[in-house]
Image (spheres, grey):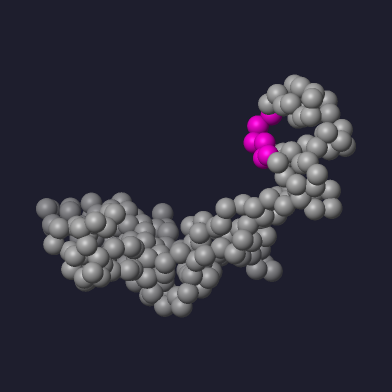
Amino acid sequence: MWALVEDNAIIKIINNPKTMVIGDVRHSKNIFSFRWTNEEREAIGIYEIVFDNSNKKDEEYYINTNQSFDYSDGQVIASYGTATPKQLTDINWTQEQIDDPSLVGKAPEGADTDTVRIEGLKTIKIRQVKEASASILQKTDWYVVRKSDAGTAIPSAITNYRASIRIKSNEMETSINNASDVPALETLYTYTTNDAGVTSRPLGEFPILES
C-alpha cells in the first residue's frame, strides 16, 4: 500500500498500483514497480506505507480498531488504536429489548430474560471443547455398540481412554469457566516452548489413544 502526500498531508491511500495524475503529469502504474526507487516515488509524493501492528490483537478475542494513517518525518505509518476485548460471558435479552418490536435483530419468539442474546467467548470455547470431545469419542463408539449388540466386552484400554477424554474435557471446561478476563482466556490457548524444547499450552490437549 502507498499514500499520496501533498504539503505534508495524506491526500489518498492507494491499495493497488494504478495510473495516477500527480500535478499535471500522468504516471503509469509502473511508478509502483521495482523500476522506481522509493526515493523517486517520494519525490513525486508517493510513500510506501509502514505498518505498525503493535496494538493489533488476535481477532478471535479482540475487536481491533480501523487503521489510521499518519505522515511524519518522511514516513506514512498505518497503526491501530486500542483493541477492545470481546464479550467474555453471555449477554441475555432484557425485557425492554424483548418488548421493543422496532429493535433490529429482534428477540426470537418465546424469548425471556434467560435467553442468550450474544454468546460470550466462554460459551463459544466450551462448545468447541464439547464438539472436539464428542468427535474423538465417536471414533471408539463402535466398541460400545458392539457390546450392546453382541455382548463383546470393551477392552480396558478403550474404556480407560474414553474416560480420560471425558476427564480432560471437564478439566478444559473448568479452566475456561475460571478465566477471569479475556487475556486470561487467551493465555489458556497460547503455546509456549520451554527450555527443553517442549511446546505446550495451559489448557492442555486431549489424550491420544496408544496403538
Q: Is residue 143 above or below residue 28?
A: below
Tell me the residue at 76%/50% (across/down): 71
121 or 206, nearer to the observer: 121
102 or 154, nearer to the observer: 102
Q: Is residue 27 above or below residue 85?
A: above
Where residue 159 appears, as percent x and y from the top left, is 28, 65
Quadrant location of the C terminus?
A: bottom left
Quadrant of residue 127 within the rendered picture? bottom left
Instruction: Tell me which segment is drawn in magenta.
Output: 12-17
Where residue 68 appears, as percent x and y from the top left, is 64, 53
102 or 17, nearer to the observer: 102
Tell me the residue at 42%/67% (across/down): 87
Tell me the residue at 80%/44% (across/down): 7
207 or 192, nearer to the observer: 192
Horizontal side, residue 210 vs residue 151: left or right? right
Tell me the residue at 68%/50% (across/down): 69
Horizontal side, residue 201 vs residue 49: left or right? left
Where residue 188 appears, as percent x and y from the top left, is 50, 69
Quadrant location of the N terminus?
A: top right
Horizontal side, residue 23 vs residue 58: left or right? right
| Residue 157 in view of the camera | no
Q: Please tell me whether residue 82 belongs to the stretch shown in magenta.
A: no
Where residue 180 appears, as percent x and y from the top left, is 46, 78
Horizontal side, residue 48 vs residue 104: left or right? right
| Residue 128 in view of the camera | yes
Q: Is residue 202 above or below residue 151?
A: below
